Image (tube, helix red, strand yellow):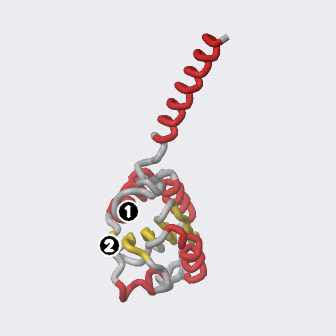
Amino acid sequence: MKKYLRGACSTLLLAAVFGMLVLSGCGGGGDAKGNIEGSCEEVLARVYENASLDEEQRTAMNEYVAAGIPAESAEYILGTTEIAYTDAVCSAPQINVVPYQCVLLRLEDESDAESAKQLLLENANPRMWVCVEAESVVVENNGDLVLFLMSDADVAEAVRTAFLDL
């Protein structure tokens, strides 16, 4: 009986160790809090790279300007100045005949994600370009990163999915 118990305990111990190794390998490249590593600009590049976009859209997006958000432009881009973030990038076409804006914000505190998302949704202006209007407004978070996107529905869904899959 002791021999049987020793074998069963060894098997359970090995299974537990293996399970811990498998689970620890599923972190997706984030830090200890589960957040995604890299600057907002680097993360956005990975999102665009992994998004399921047709070749025409991918080519167009390669021409979009990705830049930080100056304090004096925050209200225009985000619709609010009430969100505390430590890093940000906004990607948009140089000519505003295409209703597209994609923003990534790294929040100071991940626990603020829900309130930040609510502020972005409440203050989003899908007609900010005056002559054109975005079909979709997407606001999601993945750890301490918040995606704020205004675009046509197909592109919005492709970028949203790539962001959530990080």
Quadrant in which the N terminus is drawn: top right
Amino acid at dot 1: Met
Of labels 1 and 2, the one closer to you: 2
In the image, residue 99 lies at what x, y percent? Answer: 48, 74
In the image, residue 9 lies at what x, y percent? Answer: 59, 22
- Tell me if 83 is positioned left or right of 3 in this view: left
- Tell me if 73 is positioned left or right of 126 in this view: left
Work out whether residue 29 or residue 44 is closer to the camera in this orientation and state it: 29
Compare marks 1 and 2 and give the one earlier in the sequence.
Answer: 1
- Tell me if 12 is positioned left or right of 91 in this view: right
Question: Residue at the front extreme?
Answer: 2
Q: Secondary structure at mark 2?
A: strand
Q: Which residue is mark 1?
A: 61
In the image, residue 26 lies at what x, y percent? Answer: 48, 42
Q: Is residue 126 above or below residue 145?
A: below
Residue at 42%, 59% in the rendered image: 57
Question: Residue at the bottom extreme?
Answer: 72
Amino acid at dot 2: Ala
Q: Is residue 126 above or below residue 141?
A: below
Quarter of the image holding residue 77? Answer: bottom left
Q: Is residue 141 above or below residue 15?
A: below
Work out whether residue 100 or residue 44 is closer to the camera in this orientation and state it: 44
Residue at 51%, 69% in the rendered image: 151
Q: Is residue 93 above or below residue 58?
A: below
In the image, residue 160 lies at what x, y percent? Answer: 52, 59
Q: Which residue is mark 2?
A: 67
Residue at 36%, 76% in the rendered image: 95
Residue 103 visible in this rendered orientation of the protein: no
Residue at 54%, 67% in the rendered image: 152
Work out whether residue 91 or residue 31 is closer to the camera in this orientation and state it: 31
